[in-house]
Amino acid sequence: MDNMKYNKAYKFRLLPNQEQVVMFAKTFGCSRFIWNKLLDYADKHYKEHGKTDYITPAKFKPEFEWLKEVDSLALANVQLNLKKAYEAFFRKNAKFPKFKSKKDTRQSYTTNNQGGTVRIDGNTIKLPKIGFVKFIQHRQIKSSEKIKSCTISKAPSGKYYVSILVEGSSQIEQVKPVADNVLGLDYAMNGFYVNSNGEIANYPRYYRNAEQKLHKLSRAVSRKKKGSNNRYKARLKLAKWHERISNMRNDFLHKLSHNLANIYDAVVVEDIDLRDMSQALRFGKSIADNGFGTFRQYLNYKLLDRGKQLITLDKWFASSKTCSKCGTKNDDLQLSDRVYNCINKDCNHVQDRDWNAAINIRTAGMAEIAW
């Protein structure tokens, strides 16, 4: 049994009063202002001296005294986030940091818990400079988990949320996997996945089903005069529909990953790059609709919580081109070929392409499992 430390986030809906909404708006605005100021300074310094340099938000407080009205830790976290953005850019795995606009539909800031400045009391949560805010606590935070920080955000739909990061430790008994309880999953665009048992997930395609409604709402927004109250109402209606689709998708992914984590000792998947796939094959909407990348994240932490394993294979593994029965590789297999026909005359195996790939994924993963 391993004693494992972990970080975990809980997300809850906030129900602020009007005074608290004003303070949230001020903090969002100050955080955006500091981001733009720090980014402008760092950008100019790099162009002049060939290296990055950062200044603290405190440098701007004498000139802009209204910055003192909001949580200082929220501004300090802006500086940390900007440093991370620059570091990611220099590692060449992210785009250059952009200036933020007050027209951005998503707004957020992060604050830290210092000696109980963030704490839960009944159905309220205490936030620095804000006070006790009502929230919908649909699940309990364990008494052994310590609150480290929290991020307050405003969704495009106008709803407020708090994401609470906690630190804890737990005794997790590692499950010794049984061969019959190992499952392979092959990503399938139309059915979400096909597993090594030949079962299809049958993702409900929430976005595709609502696409006509979204198109109608988008046209309604574009017809309204910019800056008008009617345009704001139309945009809010569209944002609520997008949020509804996102919630339905996440609900499906959580339930599906929960069931798999309960049933199987180990699950094997491929490390496919869904972003590159969506761009190369022009299937962006279909790939973004099913959220397979998010599903893998959910499945991973749910398996780890139960002492089980998620095995990820290299994305170049030829799961689709290899015969699951004899191991012969067919390099001439095309994406349009939905049935696998083995080219080995002594085998002549015929099987659904995705099912064949799922069996190969499971077989390859069996060799990497810690038995």
Image (tube, helix red, strand yellow):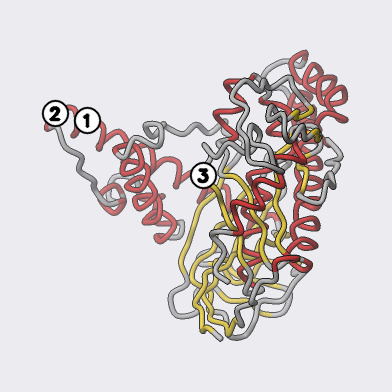
Q: Is residue 369 left or right of residue 221?
A: left
Looking at the picture, tell me which residue is in the foreground, 221 or 284. 284
In the image, what residue type sits under mark 1? Answer: Lys
Q: Identify residue for label 3.
A: 314
Residue 86: quarter of image: top left
The answer to whether marks 1 and 2 mark residues whose Cβ atoms lie closer than 8 Å is: yes
Say which quarter of the image contains residue 20. Answer: bottom right
Badge 2 density bin: few <14, some 14–19, many ≥20, Cα 10 Å: few
Q: Which mark is residue 48?
A: 2
Question: How many residues crowd around disc 1 within 10 Å: few (fewer than 14), some, or many (20 or more)?
Answer: some
Q: What whole-number distance in Å separates the C-alpha atoms at marks 1 and 2?
A: 6 Å
Quadrant holding the N terminus: bottom right
* Real-space Cα separation, disc 3 to disc 1, in angstroms: 41 Å
Please determine whether, in this image, residue 309 is positioned above or below residue 229. Answer: below
Q: Quadrant of the C terminus?
A: bottom right
Along the line of sight, which residue is nearer the eye, 276 or 355? 355
Residue 224 rendering spot, x and y as whole percentages: 76, 16
From the image, tell me which residue sits under label 1.
Answer: 44
Which residue is rendered at x = 72% and y = 79% of the image?
A: 122
The amino acid on which the numbered mark 3 sits, given as a three-letter code, is: Asp
Q: Secondary structure at mark 3?
A: loop
Question: Please, is residue 241 above or below residue 144 in the view?
Answer: above
Residue 8: image location, x then y, percent: 57, 68
